[in-house]
Amino acid sequence: MDIAIVGAGAIGGYYGARLAHGGHTVHFLARSTAAAMREAGLTVDSHLGDFSLPQPLVYSRAEDLPACDLVCVAVKATANKVVFPQLGGLVKPGGAIILLQNG
């Protein structure tokens, strides 16, 4: 399954990393942290087990992400006005959007 994580902060980074570790292809949209994620990778320290993604698929622009089967929106709800218009092209036909939001 191809998955897009829109917002790769604590919540999006964690769930996206878990999905990638489980064998899915995960594309992270991370505007402010994209360069750091590309350079250092993504590490999860958890009581469920620690692991790293040394080369996550990271994008800084939504239009660069491929269409995916599942799009997980993990930004603060206050950003919906900016984020939602960008989601249409990210979802494959028959795909789904899931919200993992707070704020």
Image (cartoon, rainbow, N blue to C red):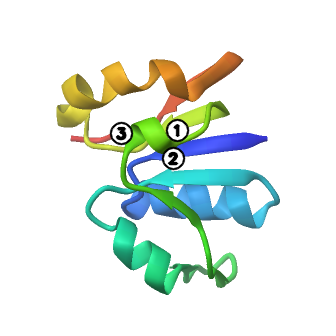
Coordinates of residue 68 in the picture (x, y in percent) = 65, 33
Disc 2 and disc 1: Cα gap in Å? 5 Å
Among the two numbered marks 1 and 3 on one chain, the one whose residue lies closer to the N terminus? 1
Q: Earlier in the sequence, mark 2 or mark 1?
A: 2
Rendered residue at 26%/42% (across/down): 76
Q: Secondary structure at mark 2?
A: strand
- Residue 83 in the image: above or below residue 15: above
Does residue 98 appear in the picture of this structure? yes
Q: Which mark is residue 5?
A: 2
- Report which residue position mark 1 lands on: 72
Q: Residue at x 30, y 31 (%)?
A: 83
Q: How far apart in space, not on screen, are marks 2 and 3 (Cα)?
A: 12 Å
Amino acid at pointer 2: Ile
Tag 3's secondary structure? loop
* Type of amino acid at the residue the image marks with label 3: Gln
- Mark number, residue 64: none
Marks 2/1 in contact by CB < 8 Å: the verdict is yes
Q: Is residue 68 left or right of residue 44?
A: right
Tag in front: 1 or 3: 1
Tell me the quadrant of the picture where the N terminus can be found: top right
**Mark nearer the viewer, 2 or 3:** 2
Q: Which residue has dot 3 on it?
A: 101
Q: Is residue 45 above or below residue 74?
A: below
Residue nearest the observer in this picture, 45 or 72: 72
> In the shown orientation, is residue 21 left or right of residue 61?
right
Work out which residue is located at the far top of the displayed protein and give it: 94
The answer to whether residue 100 is visible is no
